[in-house]
Amino acid sequence: MKDLVTARRVGAFVVSVLAVSALVGSAREGCPDTLELQDGIVIVGLYVGGTEDAVRFRVHDDVRTFGRRDVKQLTFTPVAAVAPPLPRVEQSGPAPDPGRVQIPGRWHWDDLQRRYTWLDGHWEAAREGWVWVPGQWEHRPWGWVWVDGTWRRR
């Protein structure tokens, strides 16, 4: 299984393995998802069905079945069918105190309302030896997904 696609962290709805059986019943087939196995491998693919005991997952042209005991968590990623609007220009002003970093605002896809809403930026405490890498919208074959920003070592 080491040849499977490894994923970056994607802003998403995460559930523990204890809730997999309930989730399998409510999941939409063909939705882009992230599957994390107990051994730490993370797979990005499409949920294609399952039962209380197993989850079927498509990675490229290959459909694999994973036993419930092998699954640590299953993540359903909100997907926008249309590209996000251009980012807004925010007037942040000076930092409220020294040692603060501005995390920019972003568009959020509201899956229930089927539209984008704006989330304002905010200030966070700087982390010594780290730099903030902003998140971004990425186009995938099935639509647009948000990839969370993260702190990286300098």
Image (spheres, grey):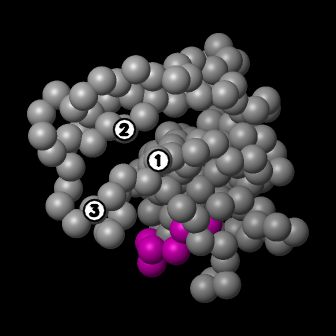
Quadrant of the rendered image containing residue 79: top right
Which residue is rendered at x = 66% and y = 28% of the image?
Answer: 86
Q: Do the numbered discs 1 and 2 sit on residues whose CB atoms are within 8 Å? A: yes
Q: Is residue 148 left or right of residue 76?
A: left
Q: What crowding class fits label 1: few (fewer than 14 Cα within 10 Å), some (14-19), or many (20 or more)? A: some
First of labels 1, 2 by sequence position: 2
Q: Is residue 133 left or right of residue 147?
A: left
| Marking on residue 68 | none
* Residue 129 placement (x, y as % from top left): 22, 66
Q: Is residue 123 magenta?
A: no
> Dot 3 lies on which element?
strand
| Marking on residue 103 | 2
Cα–Cα span, label 3 and label 2: 14 Å
Which residue is rendered at x = 52% and y = 74% of the image?
Answer: 41
* Viewport quadrant of the N terminus: bottom right
| Marking on residue 130 | 3
**Would you say residue 68 is visible in this rendering?**
no
Give the amino acid at mark 2: Ile
First of labels 3, 2 by sequence position: 2
Kindly identify which residue carries mark 1.
134
Give the amino acid at mark 1: Pro
**Magenta span: chief secondary structure:** loop
Q: Residues in magenta?
A: 38-43
